[in-house]
Amino acid sequence: MADNVFKDALIRVRDYGKSAGVSDEVIDSLMHANSILKAALPVRMDDGSTRYFTGYRCRYNSTLGPTKGGVRFHPGVNMAEVQALALWMTIKCAVVGLPFGGGKGGVVVDPKALSPMELERLSRAYMRAMADVIGPHTDIPAPDVYTNARIMGWMMDEYEAIKRTKSPAVITGKPVRLGGSLGRDDATGRGAYLCITELAKRQKLDPGKTTVAVQGFGNGGYHVARLLQDAGYRIVAISDSKGGIYSPEGFDVASIYEEKQRSRRVRAVYCEQSVCEIVEHETISNEDLLRLDVDFLIPAALEGVITEENVAAIRAPYVVEVANGPIMSGADSTLENNGVVVVPDVLANAGGVTVSYFEWVQNLQGFKWPLEEVHARLQAIMVTAFGEIWDLATEQKLSMRNAAYVLAIQRIGEAVEAHGTRDYFGN
Ligand code: NAD
């Protein structure tokens, strides 16, 4: 599957590109990565040995600005996945109108098997290997699966040591005291929450009667679940890499999160000081979670979980892609034919890169925006993007994904055509 994910991403660009009405040269420009760097990362392990990890950085397309995209630490990282993620970043930044192209990086590693010092050495080794292609005006990394603010801080520090200058704008998602933006921690979940709120308004959904299942309980999944619960939605299922829990009564998201911090697992246990109580629930697998009879299904873990093989079992009328690429292109038409509304990843999880953009702007200008300003600016961008995509989809009877790709490809296309294509030079 992993090898197919990039081919799958290209299929969508070709297919949706047809309805964008741009020249073939624009589509061709999106078929190839600008550059991919693969490097061996030597890391001194705690036992004194040296281990070599494989790292990647892909700058996919810089038509609209410096490339921007996260760094993933996961055993499943591979070149095809990194390219797919970098292509999706290219589309996503254009969807929300940011002055960025798309990039992505990753390291093949199980970070849970490393000690804190090994993790720091690996993070620094990654930046040492990639520093020639990374920079505040060339390529700007951020967190992704199994990387976090602390890791961004180490990477920034390493970059600054190499360049012998302070350069906070080189990376986003940093700890706030090291130049991070307020509001970056929950920005991905908040962006998805804003999309769901806009959708609920248009579909006249009552939050109190609306159930939600969330697959993946990390940065994206936890915050969207928390914000939805605060708004009255019922979170009936939650999972992580080890499996999930289900209760039709709904869970208290904050308690499940606290328990996950304590035991590293998603467990239906609520604790008050040292007294803990198990709440009634069923244990479910990640595959079971996808099949639940809920209103909103939110895949917020990894790509490729809804495929041609299991798509017929999806019962939720709304799927919101907080993860990148959770639905393979082969499953799109079945969902459409079944009337499922999919809020695509390139819109639903764009809150993260949007606040990363705010962080970059603040770093370049030496400003610190208050949280209210970050929230207000994020809301303005997400609500506008959602409205543009919803209106185009409604007017032209397209899926929201198709509409999002049309808008993004047209914006990239205008920039490509501004340099001149065959239409200009051929005449
Ligand atoms: P994270 O590392 O904070 O959390 C990942 C979560 O997924 C963890 O709870 C983990 O246990 C769970 N998980 C891992 N493998 C799983 C599996 N096979 N089944 C179910 N759960 C599994 O990562 P994150 O930052 O929340 O990223 C999740 C998704 O959101 C990724 O697709 C990522 O690319 C996307 N995303 C993240 C951001 C961001 O700002 N962090 C922005 C945009 C998109």
Image: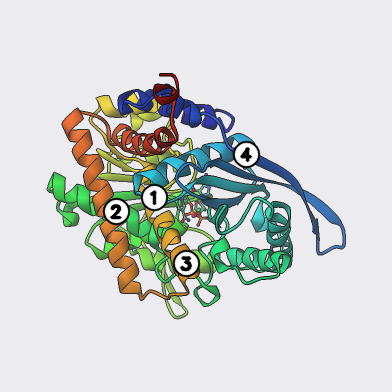
Q: Secondary structure at mark 1?
A: loop
Q: Nearer the viewer, residue 184 or 192?
A: 184
Observer-side mark, 1 or 2, equals 2
* 175 left or right of 383 in image: right
Label 1, residues with CA under 10 Å away: few <14, some 14-19, many ≥20: many
Lower position in the chain sequence, tag 3 or tag 2: 3
Q: Nearer the viewer, residue 377 or 401?
A: 377
Q: Position of residue 65 (x, y in %)?
A: 48, 48
Observer-side mark, 4 or 3, equals 4
| Alpha-carbon span between mark 4 and mark 3 | 42 Å
Number of the label disc, if any, that sits on residue 349: 1
Label 4, residues with CA under 10 Å away: few <14, some 14-19, many ≥20: few
| Alpha-carbon span between mark 4 and mark 1 | 25 Å
Residue 26, picture quadrant = top left
Q: Position of residue 50 (x, y in %)?
A: 85, 55
Lower position in the chain sequence, tag 4 or tag 1: 4
Which residue occupies 29% across, 34% down? 403
Q: Could you tell me the amino acid type at mark 3?
A: Glu
Q: Is residue 282 visible?
A: no
Which residue appears farthest toward the front when viewing the image? 427
Observer-side mark, 4 or 1, equals 4
Q: Secondary structure at mark 2?
A: helix
| Alpha-carbon span between mark 3 and mark 1 | 25 Å
In the image, is residue 142 above or below residue 333? below
Which residue occupies 43% across, 31% down? 420
Q: Is mark 1 within 8 Å of ligand 1?
A: yes
Q: Disc 2 marks which residue? A: 382
Q: Disc 4 marks which residue? A: 35
Q: Secondary structure at mark 3?
A: helix
